[in-house]
Image (cartoon, rainbow, N blue to C red):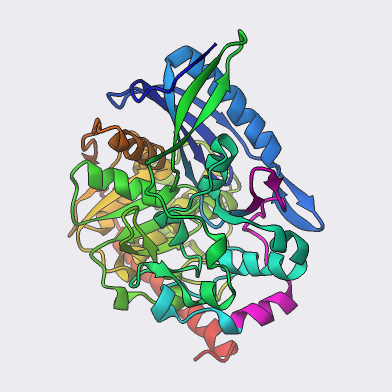
Amino acid sequence: MTTPASQSGSLAVFDLGKTNSKLFVFSEDGAVMDERRSRPVWGSHKGRAVLDEQHLFHWMSQELSDVVARHDVTGLMISAHGCTFALVRGDTGLLHPILDYEQEIPDAIAAKVAPILPAFSETYTPHLPLGFCIARHIFWLAEEEPHAFAETQSILCYPQYWVWRFTGRHVSEYSYLGAHNQLWAPLKRDYSSLVDRLGWRSRFPAIVPSGAIVGQTTVRLDEGSTKVINVHNGVHDSNSALAYYRMTGLEHFTIVSTGTWVIIINLDCPLNALDEERDMLSNVTVDGEPAPSLRFMGGREYDLISGGWTRPIGQAAVEAVMARGVFALPSWAAGGPFPEIRGEIVGGDVAGEERAAVAALYVVMMTDLSLDLIRSTNKVVVDGGLAKIDLYTSMLAQLRLGQAVVRSTMSEGSATGAAALAFKARGLFPFKDETVPVAASCIAGLEAYRDRWRELARAARARARRAAGLE
């Protein structure tokens, strides 16, 4: 027997990252009742890296069935990483596997699309590599898969793809459309000139606010019964975290949202301060406002520099590598404020904990520089995985002595923000400001190390730009 959907009860939130898939169950008072984790599987299709979406959907469906039975879940919400989309036709299926954003398009396609991308002053999106700009990947499929593209009814952003899988409903949403996709003009609050030039506007469904109830899904329980639950429109992950802190009452702050990417958003930064050559851009909030941003792949870079170090790092190791003058210089992954140069370690060989200390210092140096670039003089809120690392937050606080630095105590800002948006649609506001002040470290020589790191990085960038004829 199927029971009708209720708007009271607990909420399931899928937080889908590039390397980790998470499920959280929130009670109506905002408490986390359950948590599950998995990893997405990436494969290949016609030489293109693609998501095994059936594998992920199977995991999502199984876990959803279990938490609905265990926790009286009555709603489903989705937060997801950026740069990803799906081509779908009606209720019948996916027309091409979902592309992995970490692949460059063929040179011939890049040469065709580059001249028609809108000016930075329209989209506030730089000309980004790989699939960091959805428009390039959409153009790629339109060129190389014309039959599939011709049959496309809807281009769905990644959270909205999963909304469609669970409800059959085609919708769009502000925060994802405006996430450095070249699809959106933030100041016009409308699609960009590129969308109309290529005739894509009709392929994007109607925009519905994130968190709004857009349909229902029937969950089959183990004992054979079913339960109907509501499905809320999904959201872009870092913008979800921003929404969460704003909904708890914080104002005039810079969020440092950390995971695979470190994404920094400062609503107080003027748009004319954004430098397109340094991976600075305007995201869009869940309400459709411009959101000046900067990002670098800090989590990925830490793993690469440290060799996958997962154990604690002591202050003694940090002081040792500083005393020896060992620096990790950018960049170790695509994107970020130093796209012209490739990462290297200078000043000596390091291994083990000392190499991890160099990696931690690198991420702190990059975050500190990024805060300057995005004109951050207000409160700094550190969210995500790095918020759990005392060494990271305390060194950052030491370098930002003129600003208050706080960290989240729950460290899952994107999932909690998604929950807050869904609960808001029910008229519930369970979350309060739970950030706590960060005590600055007292590491002698950290400021001098920062100054020398900046000198080395700036010089390496200048050499690379001169060699490329950019200066």
Which residue is nearer to you in this view: 456 or 76?
76
Task: Where is residue 338? Give x, y as percent.
Answer: 49, 72
**Left or right of 236 on screen, residue 162:** right
**Left or right of 448 on screen, residue 194:** right
Task: Where is residue 219? Give x, y as percent.
Answer: 56, 22
The image shows residue 331, relative to residue 165, as above or below, that is: below
**Left or right of 105 on screen, residue 407:** left
The image shows residue 442, relative to residue 77, as above or below, that is: below
Q: Examine the structure image and report whether residue 295 is included in the region drawn in magenta.
A: no
Residue depicted at 37% across the width and 64% down the height: 293
Which residue is nearer to you in this view: 196 or 12?
196
Which residue is nearer to you in this view: 139 or 386?
139
Examine the image and state in which quarter residue 271 appears: bottom left
**Left or right of 111 on screen, residue 330:** left
Q: Is residue 256 visible in the rendered structure shown here?
A: yes
Q: Quadrant of the N terminus?
A: top right
Seen as rendered, the residue at the extreme top is 223
The image shows residue 423, relative to residue 66, as above or below, that is: below
Tell me which segment is drawn in magenta: 87-114
Task: Where is residue 128? Give x, y as percent.
Answer: 55, 71
Q: Is residue 145 visible in the rendered structure shown here?
A: no
Residue depicted at 55% across the width and 24% down the height: 218
Residue depicted at 46% across the width and 80% down the height: 459
Q: Examine the structure image and report whether residue 98 is included in the region drawn in magenta.
A: yes
Seen as rendered, the residue at the extreme right is 46
Which residue is nearer to you in this view: 297 or 17?
17
Examine the image and state in which quarter residue 107 appears: bottom right
Task: Where is residue 39? Give x, y as percent.
Answer: 62, 36
**Total number of numbered discs in the rendering:** 0
Residue depicted at 22% across the width and 41% down the height: 248
